[in-house]
Amino acid sequence: MNNKITYHREGDYLIPDLCLPKQPDGHIGKYGKLRLNYLKNFDIPFYTELLISGTLKQHLLDIDSNASNKVNLLIKGFAEDENVNELLKEYHQMEWVQAMNNFKNRAEEIVLNEIIYV
């Protein structure tokens, strides 16, 4: 791979013509932001590597997508295992809300430990 760096002159100095690769479009959600915070504070070498290579945003988008999908799958699985369904939602709304909040908290705890904080 031949990566020649070009320069331009500004006064007496030669300045390299550097540009970052095009960043992917997309919104970094809750889990991507949590991952970013973790990388900045606890995994600085990996954060720096991603930043320099221009792949930080793609990494955060991937983490956010994977974490969101896993949370949703875990919530559905917990609801099926504990027989929390639309019938419960229709007749006992507060019990359904309590159960779903419990499932969400459990799923997020799993995702944080398996995907975000590793």
Image: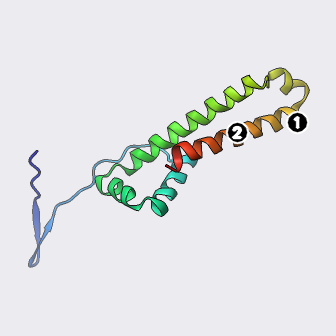
In space, the residues marked 1 and 2 are separated at their CA atoms by 15 Å
- Give the answer, above or below, for where 91 lies relative to 56: above
Q: Depth-wise, is mark 1 or mark 2 nearer the camera?
A: 2
- Give the answer, above or below, for where 113 lies relative to 41: above
Where in the figure is residue 97, as x and y percent of width and height? 82, 36
Other residues around mark 2 within 10 Å, as few (<14) / some (14–19) / many (≥20): some
45 sits left or right of 114 in the view: left
Residue indicated by mark 1: 94
Q: Amino acid at mark 1?
A: Met
Who's the residue at 50% across and 52% down the image? Answer: 35
Work out whether residue 40 or residue 109 is closer to the camera in this orientation and state it: 109
Of the image marks 1 and 2, the number of the one nearer the N terminus: 1
- Give the quadrant of residue 52: bottom left
Work out whether residue 111 or residue 68 is closer to the camera in this orientation and state it: 111
Where in the figure is residue 75, as x and y percent of width and height? 68, 32
Label 2: which secondary element: helix
| Residue 29 visible in this rendered orientation of the protein | no
| Residue 41 visible in this rendered orientation of the protein | yes
11 sits left or right of 19 in the view: left
Label 1: which secondary element: helix
